[in-house]
Image (cartoon, grey):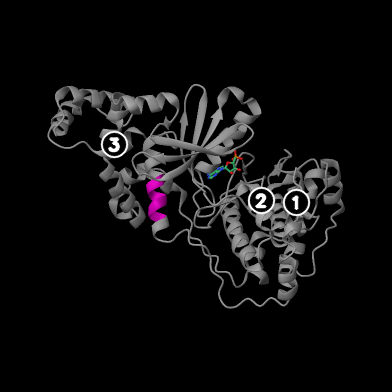
C-alpha cells in the first residue's frame, strides 16, 4: 500500500536522524519515488524506529540498540556485559559488548579506544571481528562477531585436554590469526585460553584486544606489563622493557602446553610464586606428548626471547606439517563500504559486488554510503556492510576449519588413551 505524504515526510525526517540520507534538494524527488513504491527494508526499519510504539519502547528499554535486537546475556567481563543480538535487517547473530562509560577510568578508556582501533583494522578468519560501535552518553556498545562455541579455557576445564589432532587444528588457527596480526603490526599481549573463542562451526577466533598494541616496527621497545601471569614471558617479570612479538609467541607456547596436557606449565597460587616458576623456566612435559609437539613447545618456551621460535618457524615445524594452514586474508581496505562507491566497478572483488547487491536489496544506496564516510565503525551502514561481507566470505568457505592430510601416526597413542580416562586431572588448572 502506498504511503501517504505524512508518512513520507516523517520517514525522511527519521532517516536524517539516523544519518542515513540525505541531500535536501533531492527530497522532493525522493518523496515522489517513495509514494509510488513499497518501502525498502531500511525505510521500514527507520520508520518503525520513530513511529512504531513497540519498537520505540524496545529502544528505550535497551532491548534494541541501533539496528540490533538485543537478547540474553552471554558473558561478562570486568567493565562489560556481553549480550546476544540480531541485526534487524540482515537477521545475523552478533555479540554486543556493553560498557558503562561512567565506570571507565582514564586507563580503561585508553584500552578501549585501542581495542576499537586495532580490531577495526583487522579482518581474518581467526580474529574476532568488530562490525560496529554505537555510543550513547552513558554507554558504549561494541558490535562483535558472535562466537557461539564457547572459549578454550572452559572447554579444556570441562572436557579435558584436546587430542593431538584437535590441538593441531586449534593451534594452527591461532598461529594463522597471530601471524596475520603481527604482519599488520599489532601485538595482542593478552593471549590466554579464555581469549580463544570458537564460532558455532568450530572455527577458532582470537578475541579481546584490550591490551593490544600497534607497533611501528617489530623491534619497538614496550614497557607496559600486561596479560595474565601464567601466560607472561620471563622478560615481562625480569626486565623493564620488552619486544612485543616474542611475548605473544611465549603465550602461544603456554597455550599449546595447556591444550595438549590440560594443565599450565607454570602454575602456583600466587603471582609471586608464578613469577618464580616462569623465571626458573622449568616445566615438566609429560612423556606421552608426541616428540614433534614437545620439540615445538621447547622451541617456544625459551627464556631468551631472541632464541624463541619465530612464527614462520612454527608454521614449518614438523608437528604442524600435516595441517593445511591456508587462510586467505582480506585486505583491510575492504572494511570500509566507501570503496563500493569510489572504486572503479571493475576493481571490486566478487565478494564486494555480492555485498553491494545485498546492501541495495536492503535499501542502502550509494548516497547512504557517501553520507557515512569517515565514520568508520561508528556508522550503521558500516555495520551492515561488514556483516554482509563477512557472510559472503563465510559462504565461500573462508572460515572452514583446516584439515589434516594423511594419517598422523602417534607412537604414544596407547598411553594417550590411558590419560584420557584420567580426564578429571585436567580440571586442576589454576589461573589467576
Ligand atoms: P570479555 O568482556 O571480552 O572478557 O567477554 C566476557 C565473556 O563474554 C567471554 O568470556 C565470553 O564468554 C563472552 N563473549 C565475549 N565476546 C563474545 C563473542 N564475540 N561471542 C560470544 N561470546 C562472547
Task: Identify which residue is drawn at 66% across, 66% down.
Answer: 163
**Contact? badges 1 and 3 (CB < 8 Å):** no
At numbered mark 2, what does the secondary structure look like: helix, strand or loop?
A: helix
Residue 48 magenta: no
**Bounds of the magenta segment:** 387-393
Upstream in sequence: badge 3 or badge 2:
3
Q: Tell me how many marks there are.
A: 3
Residue 2 at what x, y percent from top left?
Answer: 13, 32
Residue annotated with mark 3: 42
Kindly report which numbered mark, 3 or 2, lies closer to the viewer in this rendering.
2
- 179 shown above or below 270: below
Q: Could you say which is closer to the camera, residue 384 or residue 303?
A: 384
Query: In terms of secondary structure, what is the magenta stretch mainly?
Result: helix
Q: Can residue 58 be seen in this snapshot?
A: yes
Q: In the image, 32: left or right of 162? A: left
Q: CA distance from mark 1 to mark 3?
A: 49 Å
Any atom of ligand 1 within 8 Å of the CB at mark 1?
no
Residue 68: which quarter of the image? top left
At numbered mark 3, what does the secondary structure look like: helix, strand or loop?
A: helix
Task: Identify which residue is drawn at 61% across, 26% down.
Answer: 104
| Disc 2 packing (10 Å; few <14; some 14–19; many ≥20) | many
Task: Identify which residue is drawn at 51% across, 44% down.
Answer: 121
- 394 shown above or below 415: above
Upstream in sequence: badge 2 or badge 1:
2
Residue annotated with mark 1: 429
**Contact? badges 2 and 1 (CB < 8 Å):** yes
Residue annotated with mark 2: 153
Residue 166: which quarter of the image? bottom right
Location of the N terminus by quadrant is top left
Amino acid at each position: 500500500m502506498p504511503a501517504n505524504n505524512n508518512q513520507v515526510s516523517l520517514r525522511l525526517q527519521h532517516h536524517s536522524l539516523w544519518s542515513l540520507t540525505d541531500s535536501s534538494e533531492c527530497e522532493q524527488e525522493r518523496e515522489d519515488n517513495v509514494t509510488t513504491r513499497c518501502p525498502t527494508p531500511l525505510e521500514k526499519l527507520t520508520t518503525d524506529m520513530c513511529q512504531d510504539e513497540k519498537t520505540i519502547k524496545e529502544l528505550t528499554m535497551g532491548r534494541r540498540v541501533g539496528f540490533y535486537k538485543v537478547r540474553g546475556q552471554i558473558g561478562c567481563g570486568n567493565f562489560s556485559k556481553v549480550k546476544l543480538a540480531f541485526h534487524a535487517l540482515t537477521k545475523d547473530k552478533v555479540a554486543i559488548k556493553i560498557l558503562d562509560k561512567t565506570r571507565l577510568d582514564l586507563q580503561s578508556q585508553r584500552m578501549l579506544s585501542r581495542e576499537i582501533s586495532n580490531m577495526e583494522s583487522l579482518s581474518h578468519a581467526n580474529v574476532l571481528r568488530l562490525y560496529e560501535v554505537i555510543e550513547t552518553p552513558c554507554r558504549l556498545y561494541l558490535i562483535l562477531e558472535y562466537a557461539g562455541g564457547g572459549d578454550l579455557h572452559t572447554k579444556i576445564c570441562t572436557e579435558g585436554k584436546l587430542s593431538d589432532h584437535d590441538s593441531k587444528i586449534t593451534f594452527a588457527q591461532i598461529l594463522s590469526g597471530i601471524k596475520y596480526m603481527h604482519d599488520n603490526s599489532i601485538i595482542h599481549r593478552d593471549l590466554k585460553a579464555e581469549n580463544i573463542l570458537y564460532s558455532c562451526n568450530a572455527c577458532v577466533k582470537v578475541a579481546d584486544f584490550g591490551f593490544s598494541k600497534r607497533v611501528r616496527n617489530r623491534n619497538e621497545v614496550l614497557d607496559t606489563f600486561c596479560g595474565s601471569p601464567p601466560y607472561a614471558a620471563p622478560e615481562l617479570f625480569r626486565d623493564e622493557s620488552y619486544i612485543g612479538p616474542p611475548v605473544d609467541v611465549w603465550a602461544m607456547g603456554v597455550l599449546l602446553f595447556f591444550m595438549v596436557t590440560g594443565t599450565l606449565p607454570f602454575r602456583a597460587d600466587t603471582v609471586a610464586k608464578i613469577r618464580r616458576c616462569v623465571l626458573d623456566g622449568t616445566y615438566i612435559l609429560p612423556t606421552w606428548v608426541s616428540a614433534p609437539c614437545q620439540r615445538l613447545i621447547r622451541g617456544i618456551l625459551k627464556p631468551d626471547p631472541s632464541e624463541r621460535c619465530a612464527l614462520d618457524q612454527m608454521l614449518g615445524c614438523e608437528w604442524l606439517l600435516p595441517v593445511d594452514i591456508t587462510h586467505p586474508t582480506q585486505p583491510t581496505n575492504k572494511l570500509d563500504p566507501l570503496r563500493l562507491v569510489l572504486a572503479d566497478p571493475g576493481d571490486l572483488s566478487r565478494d564486494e559486488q555480492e555485498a553491494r547487491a545485498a546492501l541495495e536489496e536492503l535499501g542502502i544506496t550509494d548516497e547512504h554510503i557517501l553520507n557515512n564516510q569517515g565514520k568508520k565503525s561508528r556508522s550503521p551502514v558500516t555495520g551492515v556492510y561488514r556483516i554482509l561481507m563477512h557472510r559472503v566470505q563465510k559462504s565461500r568457505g573462508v572460515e572452514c576449519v583446516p584439515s589434516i592430510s594423511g594419517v598422523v601416526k602417534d607412537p604414544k597413542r596407547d598411553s594417550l588413551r590411558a590419560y584420557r580416562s584420567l580426564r578429571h586431572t585436567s580440571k586442576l588448572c589454576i589461573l589467576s
